[in-house]
Image: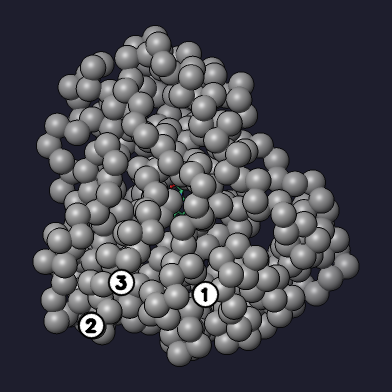
Amino acid sequence: PSSKLPQVGTTIFTRMSALAAEKGALNLSQGFPDFAPDQRLLQRAADAVLHGNNQYAPMTGLPALRGAIAALIERHYQREVDAASEITVTSGASEAIFDAIAALVRPGDEVVLFDPAYDLYEPAVTLAGGQCQRLVLTAPDFRPDWQAFEALLSEKTRLVLINSPHNPTGSCWQSADLDALWQAIASRDIYVLSDEVYEFIHFGQEALSVHSHSELRERSLVVSSFGKSFHLTGWKLGYAVAPAAISAELRKVHQFVTFCTVNPLQQAIAGHLTALPEETFALGPFYRQKRDVLRAALTKSRFKLLPCEGTYFQLLDYSAISDEDDVSFCERLVDEVGVAAIPVSVFYQNPPKGQRLIRLCFAKEEATLIEAAQRLSQL
Ligand code: PMP
Ligand code: GLN
């Protein structure tokens, strides 16, 4: 058939994880933890499968889970959310993002993305018939130029897709960025989709979220993922929070994409979140320790470390080692030193010329991080 997505192949995550498995390399490419989630949460899931309800969950998510999410948001961001009309549980943040784009973007609409952007945004916009406008962020801090952003907006702009803490760069926005975004869109008919899957993995003081911005949040969908917050990326459990009128549109799509999300896993998360809400506060220090172990172990290497303010990704500049493009360099890393990484150019529409960056995932045991750093230091 003639492809609706002619530019799209198999994602870099599938390709690099397969290559790592084939060659027996340490896999620091695709972002997922190599350590076990909380045993108590796994036990709740086992109990829910064996003794709980294994039939369809309510379309918008279990009331107990939506209630626990509302409490989490109130605790962290002092935002009151109506669990019945403003929270929708989805099959991962991916589904929430896809539903939101399908619900809001019409053929001919423009969607602003920040380049580099997570790989699922653009294909979702393309399938909805929209056009992406990309504002390039540049190393080392990857902060937006808000004047250039305003210049990108047009009568056709329907949605702005933001992501902080940012995958793949690890940069975090400041409150001035949210203010600037609001200033730019306030008088226009534009929505914001805020991908906050790494909301609890940041190393500064401030947990910056659209939830905390009283004006912006009225125009936004905020998306998060328990895969990141509870170290279980394979559960694919996420949610979208938006004012009732926007949530109603998202739900029209969600009910036909999946209808509902895995019932026993929702029961497990609801119980865990209600019993141990303080767990999520600990992710910053937990991952800062891992980041610092990786960075310290790489100081004698020829890689240059870029700043990392959040997420579990560390960028490395390899321009002192090689002039190759980053895809070839990552393939060679697997073969020659047995470490799999992600080339950063794949997240750009037009990668900056001469930029030589790879991404390492540090959601790994310290021994894995140290071993990977030792291998990379041979180069
Ligand atoms: N957005 C970003 C920025 C991500 O890194 C990820 C996970 N890799 C997702 C969305 C998707 O999250 P989920 O696995 O919950 O669908
Ligand atoms: N979000 C993960 C990453 O950035 C990958 C998820 C996926 O494999 N699609 O590494």
Q: Residues within 10 Å of mark 2 (few under 14, many from 20)?
A: few
Q: Is residue 352 visible?
A: yes
List the residue tagged with mark 3: 182
Mark drawn on residue 188:
2
Whether label 1 lies within 8 Å of ligand 1 gets the answer no
Q: Is residue 17 visible?
A: no
* Of pointers 1 and 2, the one earlier in the residue sequence: 2
Q: CA distance from mark 1 to mark 2?
A: 21 Å
Residue in the foreground of this view, choosing between 331 and 356:
356
The residue type indicated by label 1 comes to Val
The residue mark sitting in front, 2 or 3, is 3
Q: Residues within 10 Å of mark 1 (few under 14, many from 20)?
A: many
Q: Position of residue 82 (x, y in %)?
A: 60, 83
Label 1: which secondary element: strand
Q: Residue at x 13, y 76 (%)?
A: 154
Q: Is residue 210 left or right of residue 279?
A: left
The residue type indicated by label 2 comes to Arg
Q: In the figure, residue 221 lies in which quadrant? A: bottom left
* Of pointers 2 and 3, the one earlier in the residue sequence: 3
Label 3: which secondary element: helix
